[in-house]
Amino acid sequence: MPPGHGSRSAPAARNRLPDGENHSWQILRNLRGEHSCTQRVARGRLLAMGSSRTAVRGTRTRIAAILATLIRTVGGVIVLILVAHVVLTLGNANPTNGITMFLTYWADRLQLGFRGLFNPVDPRTRLVIDYGVPAVFWLVVTWVLVRLVRRLG
């Protein structure tokens, strides 16, 4: 085999840099950090071009993680509002207080029509069921959505 075509006696011509230095040694030096600023920029560009599929997958995973965290946070706030409304109402909180009015307003909107689904005789039990069932519903929906987003990411 002619020299320069991959024979064992001489390294292939494609592994040689223009100044005659072996390309594999240049790569090792770059990995150890022995390179100039211009080489560092060029190496970064080459690495970015070669890893586009990995970069897209990493970006998709990060977006899915952020979205899952956002869904979990919103679901947690909804459950917190419903449970806080039940606790304040069972604790005979002042209904004209701003916090109680705020929680009552939002709990009524977030219960999604579950109020009156069951009609127990005791009003305290009715309150727990009317707002506890939607709280459990929101927990399950949040859990399912977070799992789905994480799996798609």
Image: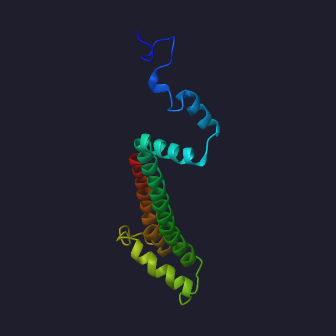
Q: Give left or right: position of 21 versus 111.
A: right
Residue occupying image coordinates x 57% and y 77%: 88
Residue occupying image coordinates x 46% and y 45%: 48
Q: How many marks?
A: 0
User: Where does residue 79 sit, x and y in percent of width and height?
Assistant: 49, 66
- Give the camera-side residue of 21 and 134: 21
User: Where does residue 121 sit, x and y in percent of width and height?
Assistant: 43, 72
Q: Give left or right: position of 138 versus 25.
A: left
User: Where does residue 3 sit, x and y in percent of width and height?
Assistant: 45, 14
Residue occupying image coordinates x 59% and y 48%: 37
Picture quadrant of residue 54: top left
Residue occupying image coordinates x 42% and y 77%: 108
**What kind of colouring is applied to the model shown?**
rainbow
Q: Give left or right: position of 8 versus 113.
A: right
Depicted 101 relative to depicted 2: above or below: below
Picture quadrant of residue 146: bottom left
* Residue with the most extreme bottom position: 96
- Give the camera-side residue of 138 and 46: 46
* Residue with the most extreme top position: 1
Quadrant showing the N terminus: top left
- Give the camera-side residue of 90 and 69: 69
User: Where does residue 98 sit, x and y in percent of width and height?
Assistant: 55, 87
